[in-house]
Image (tube, rainbow, N blue to C red):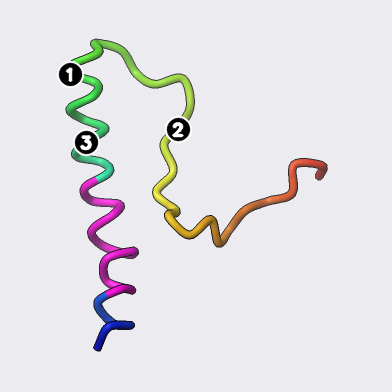
Amino acid sequence: MFKILSHLYEVIWVPVFGRVLNMFSLIIEGKKPDTKPTYDINKSSTKSKGS
């Protein structure tokens, strides 16, 4: 059960809540961020910087 909830948190909650926070930051700061936000909380898809 814990594994299912953990997976749902990572796949649904983090991206959705992250996008909502991103919208609010755009409104508050008045400009778009320089870098695109990432919603990977586990850093599972890290690419090597050398390639």
Q: Position of residue 6 (x, y in %)?
A: 30, 73
Q: Amino acid at mark 1?
A: Ile
Circle nearer the N terminus (2, 3) = 3
Q: Which residue is mark 1?
A: 27
Magenta part of the chain: 6-17
31 in relation to 8, above or below? above
Q: Is residue 11 left or right of residue 24?
A: right
**Which residue is at the far front?**
2
Q: Amino acid at mark 2?
A: Lys
Q: Main secondary structure of the magenta part?
A: helix
The Cα–Cα distance between marks 1 and 3, rounded to whole angstroms, is: 10 Å
Indicate yes or no whether the magenta region holds residue 24. no
Q: Amino acid at mark 3?
A: Leu
The residue sitting at 68% across, 51% down in the picture is: 47
**Which residue is at the far top?**
30
Mark drawn on residue 13: none
Circle nearer the N terminus (1, 2) = 1
Q: Which residue is mark 3?
A: 21
The residue sitting at 42% across, 55% down in the picture is: 41
- Report crowding for label 1: few under 14, some 14 to 19, many 20 or more residues within 10 A (C-alpha): few
Q: Quadrant of residue 38?
A: top left
Q: Is residue 20 left or right of residue 46?
A: left
Q: Quadrant of residue 50?
A: top right
Q: Which residue is mark 2?
A: 36
**Which residue is at the far bottom?**
1
Q: Position of residue 22 (x, y in %)?
A: 26, 32
Asked which secondary structure carries label 1, the reply is helix
Answer yes or no: do the residues labelled 2 and 3 have beta carbons within 8 Å?
no
The Cα–Cα distance between marks 1 and 2, rounded to whole angstroms, is: 16 Å
